Amino acid sequence: MSPPATPASVPTAAPLHGLPTDRWRRLEVAFWLVAVAAFFVFPQHRVIGNLILITGLFAVSLDLILGYAGIVSLGHAAYFGMGAYVAGILAARGWGEPLSGLLAAGFGGAILGYATSFLVVRGSDLARLMVTLGIGLMLYEAANQLSSLTGGADGLSGVTMWKILGTFSFDLAGSAAYVYSLVVLFALFAVARRIVSSPFGLGLRGIRENVKRMPAIGAPVATRLVAIYTVSAAMAGVAGGLLAQTTQFVGLDVFGFPRSADLMIMLVLGGAGRLYGALVGTAVFMIAHHWLSDLNPIYWQFWLGLLLVVVVLYGRGGLLGALDGLRERFGSGRK
């Protein structure tokens, strides 16, 4: 009869890979330190840096529904535009306090997201594409017709912002705007990260992988999709509010289809379902856009399109997916 196993001889379970974790890794910390360092290293590019941060938050909001819940959308600019106009109209009508205006923008996006979520979550992928596209087009035309409120085709001018916390003024160099947007982005990114790392987030992944089997284990599919769609719309509204506050102007293009289409490209480029893929894809797309359009104002879209085709064909999972593949390949080669 063999002796009982000692604690040292009891086999331990292998770590589970691919499951979300709340622990911040060193690469994540380095990523945010790079964003902080960019403020000091590239002072002449703080304005475009601010736009990258705002669009990055917008892309993260799309990743929550597309990358984690599998909801395809071509009209996510509807919620971005709603937030932009809420914050812009408040400031134009005399209330320019940034933080409360940002909360109002997020609330406006959340209300619109909740109201339209019941139309979006019920259909198939093709139906969702058409519904979200239709919502965006309707809001674009509504904003155009309500010119007395939105400024119509001329845009909403007269947006005057107060100092942030009564201390920091928005300047032409974009210094205050960059720091403001970075703080908001990090705070909401931490919220999104916590959501996808929770059991709720795991449930969303299950819905994305097999929506028909999730009810069999008691998961309320429709309720979860409505919840994450509302959260995503709120984040998109905050991003729109940031754009209105930091540029002090709102145009009809905030509702435009090109904004939603570009956002989809950024997410695919960086890698959907990763959160950081949304930020990396946004930075690469906007920096490449800025650089290529300066290099060749006529044919820059060709080279940007070529980059996207190469990444999609040879980098499964976007840029971050390609990096993961290279790391696994060379890591296994060293073993």
Image: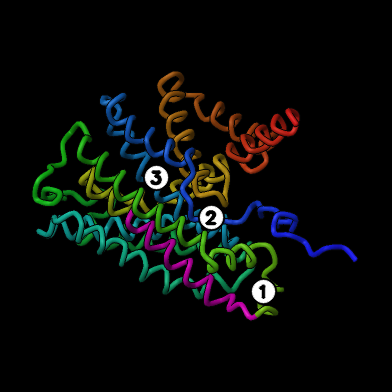
Q: Which residue is mark 2?
A: 21
175 vs 214: above or below = above
Tell me the residue at 43%/25% (across/down).
Answer: 293
At label 1, which amino acid type do we have? Met
Residue 55, which numbered label? 3
Mark 1 or 2 closer to N-term? Answer: 2
Q: Report if the CB atoms under discs 3 and 1 are less than 8 Å apart.
A: no
Instruction: In this rendered view, identify the residue nearer to me: 219 or 13.
Output: 13
Label 2 neighbour load within 10 Å: few <14, some 14-19, many 20+: few
Label 3 neighbour load within 10 Å: few <14, some 14-19, many 20+: many
At label 3, which amino acid type do we have? Thr
Magenta stretch in the rendered image: 218-238
Secondary element under disc 3, as helix, strand or loop, is helix
Q: Which residue is mark 1?
A: 214
On the image, the x and y values in percent for residue 143 come to: 31, 60
At label 2, which amino acid type do we have? Thr
Secondary element under disc 1, as helix, strand or loop, is helix
On the image, the x and y values in percent for residue 80 come to: 37, 56
Q: Point out the frontmost of discs 2 and 3.
A: 2
Q: Residues under labels 1 and 2: Cα distance? A: 22 Å
263 vs 68: above or below = above
